[in-house]
Image: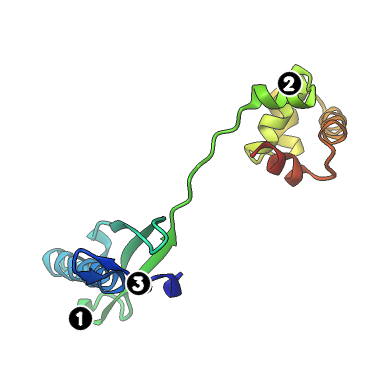
Amino acid sequence: MIPELQDVEQTGETKKQYILEEIYKLCDQIKINVDATNAIQKVSLNCKVLNDISGDPCSLRAFPIDERGGDISATRIMIFVERVTEKRTVDFEKAKKDYRLTKRELEVVTLIYQGLSNREISEKICVSEYTVKDHIKNVMKKMGVDSRSKISASLR
């Protein structure tokens, strides 16, 4: 992600400089909090959300790291730079129509999409694991896929 923080104009300064300045500000916040509380455990999470050069949001999160068992002067700061992804909603009713799924198959597909295992699905809808497997086989056939992950991918 760092290569994407290239020089791009933003309010008279480059985007790269802007993001680096925000990183330094987060580090300063951590140092102030550590000095004020004199204990790393009490420091709250420091976070900023910025846009990279493509305009996509990225999150900067700062955490203090204590290296010498409580010696605050030995504190280092770790910065996470992560892309913020958009959570997409799935129109399960459209999937039901498009793939001609039964009500129970749609229920199983919804639970697969939520990341549940066959056992968890069977407990949730009160059927045996074998019945869940049969539903999944039927769904895969109707959707033209050959795995659980492709069921989820087909819904996006």
Mark 3–mark 1 Cα distance, whole angstroms, equals 15 Å
Mark 3–mark 2 Cα distance, whole angstroms, equals 48 Å
Task: Describe the element under mark 3 as helix, strand or loop.
Answer: strand
Query: Which picture quadrant has residue 100?
Result: top right
Mark 1–mark 2 Cα distance, whole angstroms, equals 62 Å
Query: Among all residues in the image, which is located at the extreme top?
Result: 103
Residue at the (43%, 61%) spot, across then down: 82
Residue 16 x/y as whole percent: 31, 73
Q: How many marks?
A: 3
Residue 48 x/y as whole percent: 29, 57
Residue at the (13%, 70%) spot, across then down: 35
Query: Which picture quadrant has residue 101?
Result: top right
Q: Nearer the viewer, mark 1 or mark 2?
A: 2
Q: Nearer the viewer, mark 3 or mark 1?
A: 3
Q: Is residue 140 above or below residue 7?
A: above
The earlier-in-sequence mark between 3 and 1 is 1
- Residue located beneath label 2 in the image: 97
- Residue 15 seen in the figure: yes
User: What amino acid is at disc 2?
Assistant: Lys
Determine which of the numbered discs, if any, sits on residue 78 in the image: 3
- Residue located beneath label 1 in the image: 73
Residue 54 x/y as whole percent: 42, 60
